[in-house]
Amino acid sequence: MAEIPPIPPVSNPQADVVDQLAFLMGETGGIIESSVTTYKLKVFHTRAFPWDDVLKNLLYRGYKVAVTSHKADLFIEAKKQ
């Protein structure tokens, strides 16, 4: 019997990443920098931030993700591999 391939959590891989991230984060985060190969997001509300959805969207699109801090602020930096 043929094995069914898993469905990735990204519903539309061709969708605009900036729009998708802005929708997922809402008022809990913001896009500081964006280009074709790099994104820098700032987390405004750490407890309400949709960590799993944002990280999955970036990782499944082939970005290398790092969470960094500057003073009391948290940032998500994503670079295309």
Image (cartoon, grey):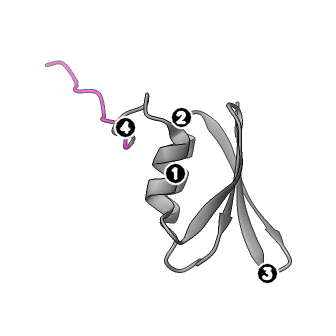
- Inter-mark Cα distance, 4 to 2: 10 Å
23 above or below 61?
A: below
Quickly name the residue at label 2.
61
- Inter-mark Cα distance, 3 to 2: 29 Å
Task: Return the disc, 4 or 3, that comes first in the chain's sequence.
Answer: 4
Looking at the magenta stretch, what is its main secondary structure? loop
* Residue 65 visible: yes
- Tell me which amino acid carries mark 2: Arg
Residue 81 lies in the magenta-colored region = no
- Inter-mark Cα distance, 1 to 3: 22 Å
Residue at far left of view: 1
Residue at x 22%, y 24% (from the top left corner)? 3
Quickly name the residue at label 3.
72
Residue at x 22%, y 27% (from the top left corner)? 4
Quickly name the residue at label 4.
8
Task: Return the disc, 3 or 2, that comes first in the chain's sequence.
Answer: 2
Residue 28 percent across, percent down from the top left:
54, 72
Residue at far top of view: 2
Q: Residues within 10 Å of mark 1 (few under 14, many from 20)?
A: some
- Tell me which amino acid carries mark 1: Leu
Residue 76 percent across, percent down from the top left:
69, 57
Please name which of the two marks, 1 or 4, marks the residue nearer to the observer.
Answer: 1
- Tell me which amino acid carries mark 3: Ala
Task: Return the disc, 1 or 2, that comes first in the chain's sequence.
Answer: 1
Task: Return the disc, 4 or 2, that comes first in the chain's sequence.
Answer: 4
Magenta span covers which residues? Answer: 1-9
Q: Residues within 10 Å of mark 3 (few under 14, many from 20)?
A: few
The quarter holding residue 8 reads top left
Residue 51 percent across, percent down from the top left:
52, 64
Please name which of the two marks, 1 or 2, marks the residue nearer to the observer.
Answer: 1
